[in-house]
Amino acid sequence: MSSLNALMVAIDAAMRKRAEARQALQARAQAAQSAQAQMDQLQDYAAQMQQRWGAQENLAVQPEVMYHQYQFMERLSHAMGLQTKAIADHAIRVETAQKALMACELRVTSLQKVVAARRRDISLAQMRREQKQTDERAALQFIGRTFGLQFQEA
């Protein structure tokens, strides 16, 4: 019975760890969504800027303004490249968190199966003890009746 209690403690600890892993996965997934939302904003802004400058193609623009515009678009492109790397990093973190959650789920399930097997074993042993006691009582009753009949005849 003490081994069963130890297993129940192990299950409780594994369930707490699983809950922590689930929360970590949710946090990492949220961070990945935020990173993707930032990327979407950068892409939308870049498209708006391209559209704005594309509509002004025929206008005469000073070279300094064009230089600053190209420089700004280059920086924006660089920011999008960095954000792409950040999204990839977040995807790796989410995948790692998913694997950790799966490992925790597997641990809880395997411990629960061990507990179920132990309970079956305990139940089977109890049934065998009860059957043995019943058989012994029946044997004693049979012997008692048999000897009781023999003593009455003599």
Image (cartoon, rainbow, N blue to C red):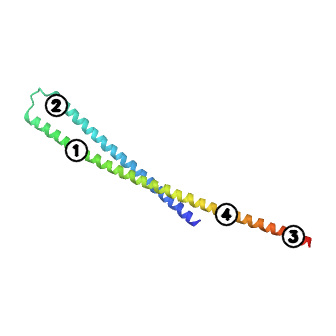
Position in image of residue 9 (x %, y %): 52, 61
Callout 1, which amino acid? Gly
> Which quarter of the image is occupied by the N terminus?
bottom right
Q: Nearer the viewer, residue 135 or 41?
A: 135
* Mark 2 in CB contact with mark 1 (< 8 angstroms): no
Mark 2 to mark 3 CA distance (whole Å)? 116 Å
Q: Nearer the viewer, mark 2 or mark 3?
A: 3
Front position among marks 2 and 1: 1
Which residue is under mark 4? 128
Contact (CB < 8 A) between labels 1 and 4?
Answer: no
Gap in angstroms between the C-alphas marked 1 and 3: 100 Å
Please state which of residues 62 and 58 is positioned toward the viewer in this rendering: 58
On the image, numbered disc 3 is attached to which residue?
Answer: 148
Which one is closest to the eye, mark 2 or mark 4? 4
**Mark positioned earlier in the residue sequence (3 or 4):** 4
| Precedes in sequence: disc 2 or disc 3 | 2
Helix, strand or loop status at disc 1: helix
Are circles 2 and 4 on residues that touch, CB within 8 Å? no
Q: Secondary structure at mark 4?
A: helix
Task: Report the residue marked by disc 1.
Answer: 81
